[in-house]
Image (cartoon, rainbow, N blue to C red):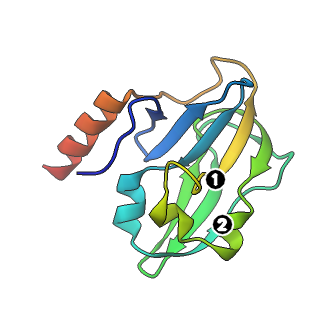
Amino acid sequence: MSSIPSELQYTRSHEWVRRLPNGQVEIGITDHAQGALGDLVFVEVPEVGRHLKAGEGCAVVESVKAASDVYSPVSGKVTASNADLASRPELLNQEPYGAGWLIRIEVDSPGASAPLMSAGDYASTLTDEAK
């Protein structure tokens, strides 16, 4: 079973959202997503300053098996991109909820997000997908 930290929120497309003390959010892909992709070999993240809409493709992660788009769960301005991933894409495999974060966003407004799930709801989604 994939790791699903309870303090995060999740999307059906396997992104996670962490609310930061400064009001921004940090976004990455879930343990389930990185496991399904396999060994990651390339990560492309958006430039700082780019404005994203909820549900918009914002990053690309590529493994030896496939390339996959990552979708922004919220609308807002990118305030940081994880530059370490350019030279160390394996961070997404090793620490998907830590050093493998993708971007940080200053959210436009609290309602400017895609539907987000709790850890329990996300776990149920994974169980349903496995059936």
Q: Residue furthest left?
A: 131
Q: Position of residue 38 (x, y in %)?
A: 39, 72
* Residue ID at (35%, 54%): 32
Asked if disc 1 and disc 2 are in contact, CB closer than 8 Å, the reply is yes
Instruction: Indicate the amino acid at tag 1.
Output: Leu
Q: Position of residue 25 (x, y in %)?
A: 65, 33
* Residue ID at (26%, 44%): 126
The mark found on residue 102 in the picture is 1
**SS class of the residue under badge 1?**
loop
- Residue 107 appears left or right of 41: right
Q: Earlier in the sequence, mark 1 or mark 2?
A: 2
Q: Residue furthest right?
A: 49
Q: Position of residue 15 (x, y in %)?
A: 49, 45
- Residue 87 appears left or right of 36: right
Up/down of 110 relative to 98, above or below:
above
Q: In terms of depth relative to the viewer, which is nearer, 55 or 123?
A: 123
Up/down of 64 relative to 26, above or below:
below
Please name the residue that numbered disc 2 is placed on: 85
* Residue ID at (40%, 57%): 33
- Residue 67 appears left or right of 34: right
Q: Position of residue 114 (x, y in %)?
A: 54, 30
Classify residue 122 by image quadrant.
Answer: top left
